[in-house]
Amino acid sequence: MRGFGTTIFAEMSALAVATGSINLGQGFPDTDGPDELLADAIAAIREGHNQYPPGLGIPELRQAIRDHHRRCYQLDYDADSEVLVTAGATEAVTAAVLALAEVDDEIVVFEPFYDSYAASITLAGAHRRTVTLRREDSRQGAGWRFDPDELGAAITSKTRAILLNTPNNPTGKVFTAAELSVIADLAERNDLVVVADEVYEHLVFDGRRHVPIATLPGMRERTIMVGSAGKSFSVTGWKIGWVAAPAALTTAVRTVKQFLTYVNGAPFQPAIARALSKQPPHYDAICASLQDRRDQLCGGLAAQGFDVVRPQGTYFATVDIHRNAVEFCRDLPRAVGVVAIPSSVFYSSAAGDSYVRLAFCKRAEVIEEALARLRGIAP
């Protein structure tokens, strides 16, 4: 793990504290989840849900995850053999990579990628092959795309899996059905598993719909779906994630997972089970609020002259500052009292060197104050 030392996130968070800055670098809300959800967790503690839960997760939560996938995506999984509760999505992805890859195998990832992916692949002794998401053009707010030929060229005889994150952190890209079809076709032709990190599945904007790659023909049997309650319900610290996959793949992930955390979150599991079962679900309101905050941040930055890439989902917006983003982000706290993250930490290449990631999962008054502090510094 040499090379995986103190992260830019720790550096920026320390700068935020030292300078009293508004922290738009951290990817978690500054408000808690729904009151009813929090009350359910408190009730679970008082009712004695404080010891080790079953290794797979409590039956109520596994059934709720199964019902959620059936209701939202018409995907049917067996709650006892094809659903696994994990310590957040990060553990689920790590356990999946460790289960699938051996030394010198290869995992294909799209860059920019969530930073734990690189660590997971390294822990497995495998190698990372990247396919870059690039801006479609330089127009204000233009989105992201990948080159199908580049993806095909990244796959070799050593490739074991494609690691897909949609909606994507940090770009906010929601992969289209056509793009997913390209990935699915290559996975089938090369007999690959797709590890689909879909933690932002319900946080998509402007009427878009998240399409799980497992819903495409032939893909249920070669996809490990990864989900999380943290993002959907604004309780990121609870670390309740899950895997839904064919029994053989779920067993492989569980075999690794049991030696990572074993189990976690006993009182949170029944609370999330109830939340997933609610109609209408809590995340509809959370998503609507996030879209308002996105529009507030992106609209305010664009009005100031920043080159903003408006996200289609997630917590994050990207700004192209047309200069070195690491230097910009290190200067920003002391200059104006705002913290951001240079997107270059999510890349293997230099393609992200001028991009900055800003989190809008904050209260409206916090975003308004950040915009006021940023006024006048647009390149």
Image (tube, rainbow, N blue to C red):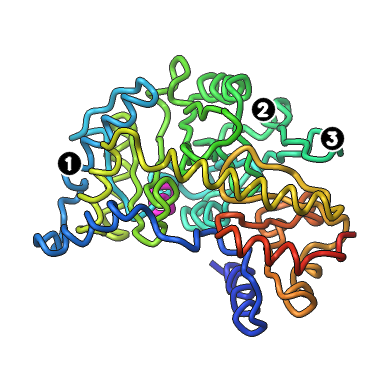
Q: Is residue 379 above or below residue 22?
A: above
Residue 229 lies, in percent from the top left, at 37, 48
Q: Looking at this rendering, what residue extends furthest in the top direction?
A: 217
Q: Contact (CB < 8 A) between labels 2 and 1?
A: no
Element type at mark 3: loop
Q: Residue at image x 77%, y 72%? A: 332
Whichever of callouts 2 and 1 sits on the residue coming sooner in the sequence is: 1
* Residue type at numbered disc 2: Gly
From the image, tell me which residue sits under label 2: 152
- Kindly indicate the quadrant of the structure image that contains residue 346: bottom right
Q: Residue at image x 39%, y 46%? A: 228
Element type at mark 2: helix
Residue 159 lies, in percent from the top left, at 55, 36
Q: Is residue 243 magenta?
A: no
Residue 263 shows in this picture: no
Mark-to-mark CA distance, 1 and 3: 47 Å
Mark seen at residue 60: 1
Q: Looking at this rendering, what residue extends furthest in the left direction?
A: 47
Whichever of callouts 1 and 3 sits on the residue coming sooner in the sequence is: 1
- Kindly indicate the quadrant of the structure image that contains residue 223: top left
Q: In this view of the protein, which residue sits in the foreground, 204 or 250?
A: 204
Q: Main secondary structure of the magenta part?
A: helix
Element type at mark 1: helix
Mark-to-mark CA distance, 3 and 2: 23 Å
Q: Looking at this rendering, what residue extends furthest in the bottom direction?
A: 18
Q: Left of 224 or right of it: where is 373?
A: right
Badge 2 crowding class, 10 Å Cα cut-off, few under 14, some 14 to 19, many 20 or more, is some
Whichever of callouts 3 and 2 sits on the residue coming sooner in the sequence is: 3
From the image, tell me which residue sits under label 3: 137
Q: Which residues are magenta?
A: 89-95
Residue 282 lies, in percent from the top left, at 37, 42
Q: In this view of the protein, which residue sits in the foreground, 110 or 159?
A: 110
